[in-house]
């Protein structure tokens, strides 16, 4: 059985405590690795090594740092098959998704910020008798904490800009899916990343995660995860006047107008609802359909959802794999029961669904679609983060907008219409940080990424991430 190791001061190390947690394959319920439970001593070692590495790393030219990131990107590509297999085994996601989305995107993250840092220029303002220019300095030792749903994809999305801009990093992957972060640490060793520049600590959120956030030597925290955890991190960080970037939960609305291209919309929304078993913060979960096409949309949508193949994630033709853990499966099933209590009518889904053979004990669930749920009910307001969506009707643009905005979340939305003016009008008024028109999860890494309301604080992506990980200093010179 593989014993996952921490990555501290350039070396793979067991935890001081010698305590481990099980790493479970959700498609088979088998334990395939052991996860170190890191403690304060491991954190101290990581911080000492990061502080020591900071002077030299921040003193390198942008091009020199970019070269390390490019080397890491290259090694991710070279090891794509192994990484995709590990990601699928750890999360239950279809291997095809890991091969085409998760792992290539992890390589792109490293490449993108390697290029971006070489183009990151400071501002200058010339006046009548003076000139101002801004320096952008790295912050020091920063923390990157990421969730389980897109493990390597989101881990590298944070680490790449932090390192590119000259910081040293203490990173913590989710204890539910730590395996590709461990493989990533081996890649960093192979790439010759200088000692201490990146340190990866494994363990639980309430223990090592909390210890990282409590530590005053950490100059910034970039966090992606649940809203409740984000709130705790904000509370701890506020009295330290520390920078935080919080990418949190969502309850994403989709607005389907009668003038949409129906085939494209149905196909797009099946993908938006059930990719990665619905375990993407950007997945659509509240689908509002204009009354005149409601029945037509519903019939076509349900047909396509019923055709989705749920099964062994290692079989390439399966569309959906297993949910990430037995606890998460229970949580989603509880929401399905709640939806029924709240008056929802189940249009498709089967909770008793089970597979045979190796996958008999796995945490599989067929996609569930409800209708007739009251807008304000818990199933329409709380994040389920699984393969469950709710269909509702609206009449006209005004009502569509009210329904979409009736949420404490504000991460992502989709608008399906062929009326360009309408798309602009709604795009400007809808309360989400990301708006997709006639598409979903079409990502350009240069764009600001993040949520409004309880979906977060700050933006990642492109120059926003480089600004977050640097401190501006203005220098004014009088002629
Ligand atoms: P989570 O908040 O439970 O955990 C996220 C990470 O934080 C994990 O590494 C965990 O160990 C750590 N953590 C937990 N408690 C902590 C604490 N007290 N102090 C420090 N670290 C702590 O979230 P999760 O269940 O892993 O992920 C699912 C959530 O993530 C969903 O709400 C989803 O919407 C959200 N998410 C958001 C985005 C986005 O970009 N907005 C992307 C992916 C996932």
Image: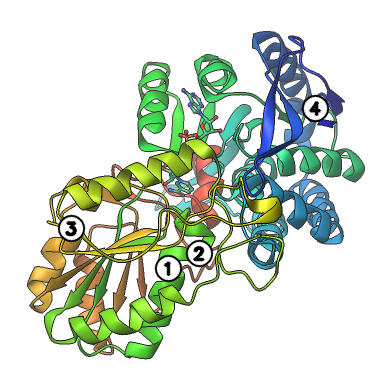
User: Which residue is at 38% across, 24% downward?
Assistant: 232
Foreground: 132 or 98? 98
**In whole angstroms, how far apart are the C-alphas of marks 1 and 2?**
6 Å
**To which residue does mark 2 refer?**
275
One can see residue 290 in this view: yes
The residue carrying pointer 2 sits among few (fewer than 14), some (14 to 19) or many (20 or more) residues within 10 Å by Cα, namely many
- Ligand 1 has an atom within 8 Å of the beta carbon of the residue at disc 1: no
Badge 3 marks a residue whose secondary structure is helix
**In whole angstroms, how far apart are the C-alphas of marks 3 and 4?**
44 Å
Quadrant location of the N terminus? top right
Ranked by sequence position, the earlier of labels 2 and 4 is 4
Marks 2 and 4: which is nearer the front? 2
**To which residue does mark 4 refer?**
5
**To which residue does mark 1 refer?**
272
Q: Position of residue 250 (x, y in %)?
A: 34, 50
Foreground: 171 or 375? 375
Marks 3 and 4: which is nearer the front? 4
The residue carrying pointer 3 sits among few (fewer than 14), some (14 to 19) or many (20 or more) residues within 10 Å by Cα, namely some
Q: What number is the disc on residue 473? A: none
Task: Tell me: 349 left or right of 67.
Answer: left
Q: Position of residue 22 (x, y in %)?
A: 68, 28
Q: Position of residue 130 (x, y in %)?
A: 45, 46
- Tell me if label 1 and label 3 are in contact, CB under 8 Å: no
**To which residue does mark 3 refer?**
405
Q: Position of residue 294 (x, y in %)?
A: 19, 81
Foreground: 232 or 356? 356
**In whole angstroms, how far apart are the C-alphas of marks 2 and 3?**
24 Å
């Amino acid at each position: 059985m593989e014993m996952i190791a921490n990555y501290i001061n350039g070396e793979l190390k067991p935890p001081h405590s010698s305590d481990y947690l099980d790493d479970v394959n959700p498609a088979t319920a088998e334990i395939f690795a052991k996860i170190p439970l890191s403690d304060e001593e491991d954190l101290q070692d990581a911080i000492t090594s990061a502080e020591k590495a900071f002077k030299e790393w921040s003193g390198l030219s942008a091009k020199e740092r970019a070269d390390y990131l490019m080397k890491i990107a290259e090694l991710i590509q070279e090891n794509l098959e192994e990484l995709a297999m590990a990601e699928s085994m750890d999360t239950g996601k279809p291997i095809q998704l890991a091969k085409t989305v998760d792992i290539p995107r992890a390589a792109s993250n490293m490449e993108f910020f390697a290029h971006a840092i070489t183009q990151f220029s400071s501002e200058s303002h010339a006046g009548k008798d003076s000139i101002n220019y801004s320096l952008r300095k790295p912050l020091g030792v920063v923390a990157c904490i990421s969730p389980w749903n897109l493990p390597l994809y989101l881990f590298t999305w944070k680490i790449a800009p932090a390192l590119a801009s000259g910081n040293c990093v203490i990173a913590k992957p989710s204890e539910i899916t730590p395996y590709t972060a461990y493989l990533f640490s081996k890649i960093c060793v192979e790439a010759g990343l200088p000692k201490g520049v990146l340190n990866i600590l494994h363990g639980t959120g309430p223990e090592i995660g909390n210890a990282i956030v409590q530590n005053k030597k950490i100059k910034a925290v970039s966090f992606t995860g649940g809203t409740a955890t984000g709130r705790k991190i904000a509370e701890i960080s506020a009295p330290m006047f520390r920078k935080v970037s919080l990418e949190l939960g969502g309850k994403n609305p989709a607005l389907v107008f009668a003038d949409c291209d129906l085939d494209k919309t149905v196909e797009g929304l099946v993908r938006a609802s059930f990719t990665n078993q619905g375990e993407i913060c950007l997945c659509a979960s509240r689908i509002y359909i204009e009354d005149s096409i409601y029945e037509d949309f519903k019939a076509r949508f349900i047909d396509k959802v019923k055709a989705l193949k749920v099964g062994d994630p290692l079989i390439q033709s399966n569309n959906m794999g297993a949910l990430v853990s037995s606890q998460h499966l229970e949580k989603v099933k509880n929401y399905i029961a709640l939806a029924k209590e709240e008056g929802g009518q189940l249009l498709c889904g089967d909770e008793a669904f089970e597979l045979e053979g190796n996958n008999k004990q796995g945490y599989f669930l067929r996609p569930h679609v409800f209708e007739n749920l009251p807008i304000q009910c818990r199933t329409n307001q709380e994040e389920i983060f699984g393969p469950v969506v709710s269909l509702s009707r609206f009449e006209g643009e005004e009502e569509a907008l009210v329904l979409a905005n009736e949420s404490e979340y504000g991460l992502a939305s989709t608008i399906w219409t062929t009326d360009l003016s309408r798309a602009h009008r709604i795009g400007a008024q809808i309360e989400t940080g990301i708006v997709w028109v006639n598409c979903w999860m079409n990502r350009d890494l240069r764009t600001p990424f993040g949520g409004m309301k309880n979906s977060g604080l700050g933006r990642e992506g492109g120059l926003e991430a480089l600004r977050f990980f640097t401190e501006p200093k203005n220098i004014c010179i009088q002629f």
